[in-house]
Amino acid sequence: NFARQFDRELWPELGDRLAAIFAAKPRDEWISLFEGSDACVGPVLGPHESALHPHMAARGTWQAVDGALQAVAAPRFSSARWTPPKSPARGEHDAEIR
């Protein structure tokens, strides 16, 4: 019963019920359902999907570096231009990590 949402004893059960409710519909159906509402809801996107999202693309949030998609450094200021460092080769820093 969600009317008792502050009862900590019920949280595992309520969490399971919410998980089942959200699992009952595909992600894009939930996005469509909440579109235009005042609910603070947004999908969890993987890096490649996020890079294609209009908001992220407009902000330049993702950049390909040596063929790999990477998040651009934040915060970014209008007067500064971020240049990504070269990606290390596999195993290049093994000695420093150990």
Image (tube, helix red, strand yellow):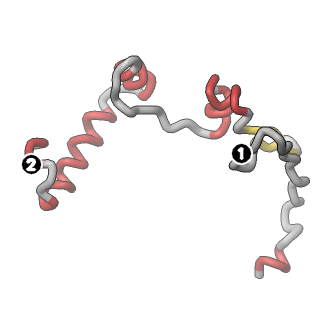
Describe residue 36's horizontal placement relative to residue 66 as left or right.
Answer: left
Rendered location of residue 10, percent (x, y): 13, 55
Left or right of residue 90: residue 15:
left
Q: Residue furthest front?
A: 79
**Circle nearer the N terminus (2, 1):** 2
Q: Secondary structure at mark 1?
A: strand
- Left or right position of 49 against 76: left
Q: Residue at x 29, y 42 (%)?
A: 19
Q: Quadrant of residue 88?
A: bottom right
Q: Quadrant of the C terminus?
A: bottom right
Q: CA distance from mark 2 to mark 1?
A: 41 Å
58 vs 8, nearest the viewer = 58
Q: Is residue 92 above or below residue 3?
A: below
Quadrant occupied by the N terminus: top left
> Looking at the picture, which amino acid does disc 2 mark?
Arg
Query: Dot 2: within a 10 Å radius of its alpha carbon, few (fewer than 14), some, or many (20 or more) residues?
Result: few
In the image shown, does 61 or 87 lie closer to the viewer? 61
Looking at the image, residue 72 lies above or below residue 12: above
Tell whether 54 sits left or right of 66: left
- Residue 53 versus residue 23: which sits nearer the camera? 53
Give the structural element (helix, strand or loop) at label 2: helix
Residue at the image point whose x is 86% and y is 54% from the top = 87
Instruction: Estimate the x, y position of residue 85 in percent, counting from the top left.
Output: 88, 54
Instruction: Tell me the residue at 88%/45% (across/down).
Output: 66
The image position of residue 67, as x and y in percent, is 85, 41
Labels 2 & 1 near each other (Cβ < 8 A): no
- The amino acid pointed to by label 1 is Ala
Q: Residue tagged by mark 1?
A: 71
Label 2 belongs to which residue? 4
Residue at position x 67%, y 35% in the image: 48
Q: Residue 28, percent across and down?
A: 45, 23
Residue 61's image quarter? top right
